[in-house]
Image: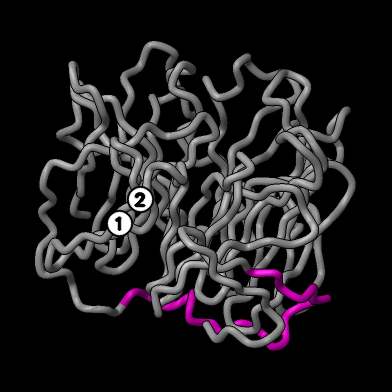
Amino acid sequence: MNLRPILFASVLTGCSPEIKAMPDSGLADAPSASDARSDTRAACDALALPTISVAKADPNGYPPYAIDGCQLAYVSSNGNLILRELGSGAEEVIASAIEQPRRPCLKDGVIAWEGTNTEGKSQVHVRDASRLILRVSGAFDHAGEPRLSAGALVFTAWKGDGDLSDSSINVFDLATETLLELDANGQQRFADVSATHVLYTDFGEDPDGTFNNNETDVADIAIYDRVARTTTTRKLTGKQAFARVADTSAMIYLSWKLIHPEPKLAAYELMTGPISANVTADREVALVTQNAASGYILPSAQNGLVEWVGGDGLADSATRLWRTRLDVIAPVSVDGLDALSLGAPAAHPQFTLLSVRPNGALSPELRLLTK
C-alpha cells in the first residue's frame, strides 16, 4: 500500500496514522481475479497449535480469529490482537487490549480489525504488508464489521452516534487508496467482499430501516458489482442477512420467514444462491438450530465448501460442526467435537479453524481441524 499525499497520516505518540481517503465514484481499474484462484501456497510446516485461549465471539457472530495462508490472527483471552506464523510459531502483538481489538480479518498479508479510539468510538484499522497500521476515517461517526479480499477492505460506517443511526457500506481500495460509499435508504450492514463483488444486508425495507435484532426486522441481500459499478437487490420475503462469498459465482446467507422465532438466531435457514439478482436458483443448505444464549454463530464458505455450527434441524439436537459442498448438498457432521461448545468456523483450503470450549474451561480455545 503506497501512501500518497491524498492521505492525512500524521503520527501521534501511541496512535496509528489516520487514513482520510479521497471519495471515489468507483474503482480506478477492474479488480484482479486473484481472489478466485485456489490457494497454491505451500502447506504450513507445522499445523499443530499449542493451547491458545481466545476471547468470546460477539453477539453478531464475528469470530475473534481469522486465518489465511500460514498466518493466524486472534484476539487472546487477555484482549490483545496477535498475529501468529503457523510454520514457525512466531507471534507478534498487533494491538493491545487497551484498544479493545475485535473482529480481525486476514488476506494476503494484510490484517484489518475493529477497535475503540480515544473518544470511545469503534474504528476500523488496517495493517498492510509493510507493517504500517492505519485508522480508516471518512465522512462518518464510527465504523466496524470489517472484511477483506485481495486488494479491498469493506466495513460498516455509521453516520451518527450509536449503532441504530443510519449506516452505509464503505469499500476501501488498498491499491488506489480511495473510499467508495455504497449508500441507500435505511441501514446497510454485514458486508463481505471478493475481487468482483460486495455483498451486504440492506435494511431499506425494514419498518424503521435499522437492525434492531427483533421480530420486526426485515432485510434483503444487495450486491455491488465492482467491475460494472452497479448495485442490485435480491428481493425475497422475510429477512435475509449475513451473506458470504462462497466461490466466484455463489453466495451463502441466513434467511428467516416473515413469521420467525424470537430470538431469530435460535433457528434459521442456511441458503445458497448465485451472486446475482436471480433468486429462482436459491437452495436450502440446512435448517440450522442453535443455542440462542450464544448469539449468532456465523457460517463460513470458501471454494464451494460451506461449514456451520448448529443442530440438524431438531430443537433438542446437539450442536455440531457441519460441512457440505454446494455443487452436491449433502451435509455431514465432523467427528471428535462431542461435549464441546463450538465457535464460528473460519475457512481455509487445508483446514478449519474454530474455537472450542470444554466443560469447565474459562475461555474458548482454538482448534485446527484438517479437511
Q: Residue at x 24, y 56 (%)?
A: 351
Q: Could you tell me which residue is drawn at 37 percent across and 75 percent down?
A: 38
The region drawn magenta spans 19-39
Given residues 9 and 109, the one toward you in this image is 9
Q: What residue appears at the point 45 percent right and 68 percent down from the top-left corner?
A: 127
Let me know if residue 249 appears in the view: no
Farthest residue to the top: give it.
316
The disc labelled 1 sits on which kind of residue?
Val
Of the residues under marks 2 and 1, which one precedes in the sequence? 2
Give the percent coordinates (x, y) of residue 103: 47, 47
Decide: is 295 above or below 116.
above
> Mark 2 and 1 residues: CB-CB less than 8 Å, in contact?
yes
In the displayed structure, would residue 30 be above or below residue 8?
below
Q: In which quadrant of the rendered image does the C terminus lie?
A: bottom left
Residue closest to the eye, 62 or 242: 62
Q: CA distance from mark 2 to mark 1?
A: 6 Å
Please tell me which residue is depicted at 55% across the width and 49% down the height of the picture: 252
Residue 21 in the image, given as x and y percentages of width and height: 71, 73
> Where 164 falls versus 339 (above or below)?
below
Which SS class for mark 2?
strand
Q: Position of residue 51 (x, y in %)?
A: 13, 41
* Residue 292 lies in the magenta stretch: no
Q: Is residue 30 magenta?
A: yes
Residue at label 2?
81
Tell me, yes or no, if residue 127 can be seen here: yes
**Circle 1 sits in a helix, a strand or a loop, which is it?**
strand
Magenta portion: prevailing SS class: loop
Residue extending furthest front?
Answer: 13
Residue under pointer 1: 93
Q: Is residue 57 left or right of residue 252?
A: left
Q: Residues within 10 Å of mark 1 (few under 14, many from 20)?
A: some
Identify residue type, mark 2. Answer: Leu
